[in-house]
Image: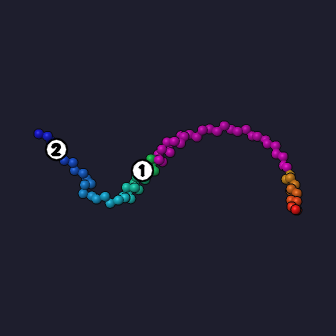
Amino acid sequence: MTEQLVFHHRYDGEKDTGLSWPRIAGIAFVIALHLAALMMLLIPAVAPKAAKEKERNVMVTLVDAPPPPPPPVPYTH
């Protein structure tokens, strides 16, 4: 004799009502939480030490602006 298994699903009696906004909000929250955790894992634990930069002296020469161009010559036939 073979045994027949009967499966009872929780949601058999419920109709599909469309979008479930609480479920959408929950999934969006979980995704954001996981992304935040991933970003926390990607940052370095200790910031790398920057090499101390020696002071540099830069010579600057100020140049006067060039004179304006001459006015255009009127066109004649």
Which quadrant: the C terminus?
bottom right
Q: How crowded is mark 1: few (under 14 residues within 10 Å), some or many (20 or more)?
A: few
Check the image and name the residue furthest to the left.
Answer: 1
Kind of residue at disc 2? Gln
Per the image, the residue denoted by label 1 is 30
**Depth order, front residue of 23/17:** 17
Label 1: element kind: helix
Q: Residue at (16%, 44%) from the top-left corner?
A: 4
Q: Residue at (40%, 55%) from the top-left corner?
A: 24
Q: Residue at (54%, 40%) from the top-left corner?
A: 44
Is most of the magenta stretch helix, strand or loop? loop
Magenta stretch: give its range.
Answer: 35-63
> Left or right: 75 with respect to 46?
right
Per the image, the residue denoted by label 2 is 4
For marks 2 and 1, give the CA distance: 40 Å
Q: Is residue 36 magenta?
A: yes
